Image (spheres, coloured by chain):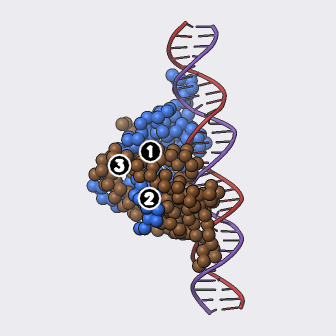
Chain colours: A blue, B brown, C purple, D red
Amino acid sequence: MNDPTQSGFDLQDFLPYLLNQAAETASRGFQDIYRSRYGMTRTQWRVMANLGKFGAMTARDICITSHIEKTKVSRAVAGLEHEGLLARSPSSQDRRAEVLSLTDKGLAVFADLGREAISYDRALRARLGQQVAGNLNLILRAVISETNGSVGDYGE
Amino acid sequence: MNDPTQSGFDLQDFLPYLLNQAAETASRGFQDIYRSRYGMTRTQWRVMANLGKFGAMTARDICITSHIEKTKVSRAVAGLEHEGLLARSPSSQDRRAEVLSLTDKGLAVFADLGREAISYDRALRARLGQQVAGNLNLILRAVISETNGSVGDYGE
DNA sequence: TTGACTTGGTTGCACGTGCAACTATAAACC
DNA sequence: GGTTTATAGTTGCACGTGCAACCAAGTCAA
């Protein structure tokens, strides 16, 4: 590895770069599943995963728990609703907010993708080794909470 | 953490999700630098980092070493050339290919960003702890080489 | 009640990207 | 030679995203 500019900088050791590459390769395979099978976006999948886990919640709640920007959530919700996977009902406490929940169809899709996700994750961890995978899990959380010094709106 | 659907799936423990979140938070700060300071794209920054390290190379070479898709490289190169940061010269061996290299201006920009990147990376590693950071580095490489079972074209 | 300010959510626009299709040159084969 | 097949690089188009601006409902205080 020569370095004509003597800069001493190597992209291949730059943590943000490595993280992005790793995230991309790790995500690709699962993305293919929810995209080809249900034509879903990553954000849609994430929104669905939240509703699947927590039941009913507002868009705002999703933003907070998942650090997804609100415009992304808004559009993902619109898409999921259009596909009949999600339903909105007005909030009784706040007429601006809407309570979101998965429809039966949405629950079925989530059940399917949840299963796939679990086995995908399991396979990935197996390839890395349980020890290493657990380690990675912890470190990533550290990375996420570091630097994440709470910015405008709510996160992100 | 309740789980109404009993799916057993938790997005917060899904490795692809964690990797993406970590990558995003880790990248954000540095992205602000090359974007606000030079109006550069992430891909442009990466292409520049390659040329800065390796000197002169073709677009194809960049694709191979950095696993960036060729259309992204093509556009990044066009942009960098437009800004006068990069120059093309026809390859003597292959009239389809062009040898890319940074101009003096490009070298100066790379020197600046390279410095910034090094200190950014150093700060990040310091926050994680050297031990953990080194660990992360290794694991990420493993993640990248796993799953990366060589697809069409050259990588990506 | 009225006004200033906050907050839940949506929308317009510009932009980077993924993919497929395309041009031009090179290499392989008969 | 001539014909196929692979390769370097570009381009058109559709699409998801980031950001700023926006609307409507809530909040708080005078």
Query: Where residue B73 sits in the image (x, y, percent)?
Result: 57, 61
The residue at 41%/41% (across/down) is: A147
Residue type at mark 3 is: Arg
State which chain disc 2 sits on: A
State which chain disc 3 sits on: B
Query: Where residue B78 sits in the image (x, y, percent)?
Result: 63, 60
Query: Where residue A114 sits in the image (x, y, percent)?
Result: 43, 49
The residue at 45%/49% (across/down) is: B116
Residue type at mark 2 is: Ser
Q: Nearer the viewer, residue A120 or B110?
A: B110
Mark in front: 3 vs 1: 3
Which residue is denoted by mark 2 in the rendering?
A7
Task: Report crowding for label 2: few under 14, some 14 to 19, many 20 or more residues within 10 A (C-alpha).
Answer: some
> Does A97 sit above or below residue B48?
above
Query: Where residue C23 sits in the image (x, y, percent)?
Result: 71, 71
Which residue is denoted by mark 3 in the rendering?
B125
Which residue is denoted by mark 1 in the rendering?
B25
Label 1 SS: helix
Q: Nearer the viewer, residue D6 or C9?
A: D6
The residue at 56%/52% (across/down) is: B41
Distance from Cα at disc 1 to Cα at disc 2: 25 Å
Q: Earlier in the sequence, mark 3 or mark 1?
A: 1
Q: Nearer the viewer, residue A13 or B84?
A: B84
Mark in front: 3 vs 2: 2
Q: Is residue A38 visible?
A: no
Residue type at mark 1 is: Thr
CB contact under 8 Å: marks 1 and 2:
no
Distance from Cα at disc 3 to Cα at disc 2: 19 Å
Label 2 SS: loop
